[in-house]
Image (cartoon, rainbow, N blue to C red):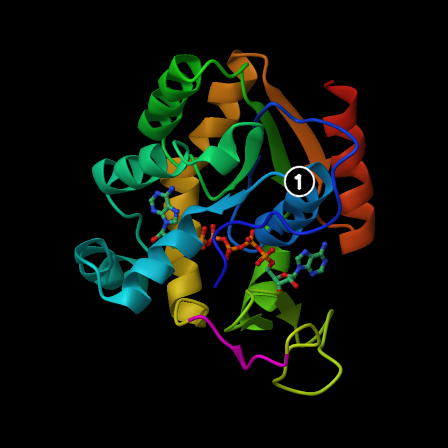
Amino acid sequence: MATSEVAGARPHEKLHRAVILLGPPGAGKGTQAKELARKYGVPHLSTGDMLRESIAKGTSLGEQAKPIMARGELVPDSLVLKMVAQRIEEPDCANGFVFDGFPRTVAQAQYLGQMLREHGFRKPFVVHLVIDFALLMKRLTGRRVCKVGGEIYNIYDKPPKAAGVCDNDGGELIQRPDDSAEVIGQRLEAYGKQTAPLVAYYKRLGLLHEVDAAKRVEEVKRQLFEVVRGAK
Ligand code: AP5
């Protein structure tokens, strides 16, 4: 699965900063981060995808993260921060990037602020994808992801043309192991306890913007592009 997406034509607008998409599991962070990254020609940095890649490769990080992710809990800050610090050193991050699933704790947010300052980036632009938890179970249990390119589908709302096959590259569509009803419950609980406080944290810093994520994908995308464009 792709951890960074720089696909698409040459961007006509520059980002030059980190955009953070904040929201519960299933809010649409991955779906919208891909679109935004494509528009600005910057990498889409999904810490969930990076960790799943480490698991698939059987690295030491993957071995440590696997049982934690299977339970729907957060991977320790120390592991995630090291992984992100290395990733944003890559040359493709020089013009900015879109975070999906990071930061997820106040400690991660504080460390990110320090990393961005050290790299000479402006303050991050944070978008909270606001959605009622009642909508999330259907989105997550219906999600299917392409094993090859990481394209995200939904058997209810965004089915592929042929069942189980990616429209883009013919890759097999799979269900994430943590998209079972039981683990989704744990993930939502972890979000409420550890990640939701970031909404107040970024609001206090004057960096928070809100988008209604309960709308259809195209409408959420329209709102998101509008707020990010407005920040220029
Ligand atoms: P991660 O991979 O980040 O998962 P998540 O935060 O639980 O978010 P999801 O990927 O499930 O949802 P999403 O908001 O991206 O929604 P999507 O666009 O796919 O994290 C997984 C695990 O890794 C964590 O539990 C943790 O263990 C670990 N981890 C990761 N980062 C970490 C960190 N920083 N620190 C510690 N641990 C970390 O959409 C979902 C579905 O809805 C799709 O089917 C999509 O088609 C559909 N959909 C999207 N938008 C809409 C819409 N507007 N209308 C209708 N359907 C929609």
Q: Is 130 on the left-hand or right-hand side of 89?
A: right
Residue 226, compared with residue 30, is above or below; it is above
Residue 139, compared with residue 37, is above or below; it is below
Task: Tell me what residue is drawn at x 23 percent, y 66 percent.
Answer: 58
Query: Which residue occupies the foreground of this view, 68 or 82?
Result: 82
Within-10-Å neighbours for mark 1: few <14, some 14–19, many 20+:
many
Q: Is 191 on the left-hand or right-hand side of 207?
A: left
Quadrant of residue 63 within the rendered picture = bottom left
* Chain part drawn in magenta: 170-176
Task: Tell me what residue is drawn at x 61 percent, y 85 percent.
Answer: 164
Q: Please indicate, yes or no, whether residue 168 appears anywhere in the rendered image.
A: yes
Across and down, in percent, residue 101 comes to 47, 44
Across and down, in percent, residue 181 comes to 45, 70
Query: Which residue occupies the foreground of this view, 127 or 231?
Result: 231
Main SS type for the magenta part? loop
Quadrant of residue 153 within the rendered picture = bottom right
Quadrant of residue 69 within the rendered picture = bottom left
Whether residue 175 is in magenta: the answer is yes
Q: Is 44 on the left-hand or right-hand side of 157?
A: left
Query: Which residue occupies the foreground of this view, 16 or 75?
Result: 16
**How many numbered circles does the render carry?**
1
Across and down, in percent, residue 225 comes to 77, 36
Across and down, in percent, residue 90 comes to 42, 36
Q: Which residue is mark 1?
A: 41
Task: Tell me what residue is drawn at x 59 percent, y 58 percent.
Answer: 136
Residue 130, compared with residue 120, is above or below; it is below
Q: Secondary structure at mark 1?
A: loop
Could you tell me the amino acid type at mark 1? Gly
Residue 136, compared with residue 171, is above or below; it is above
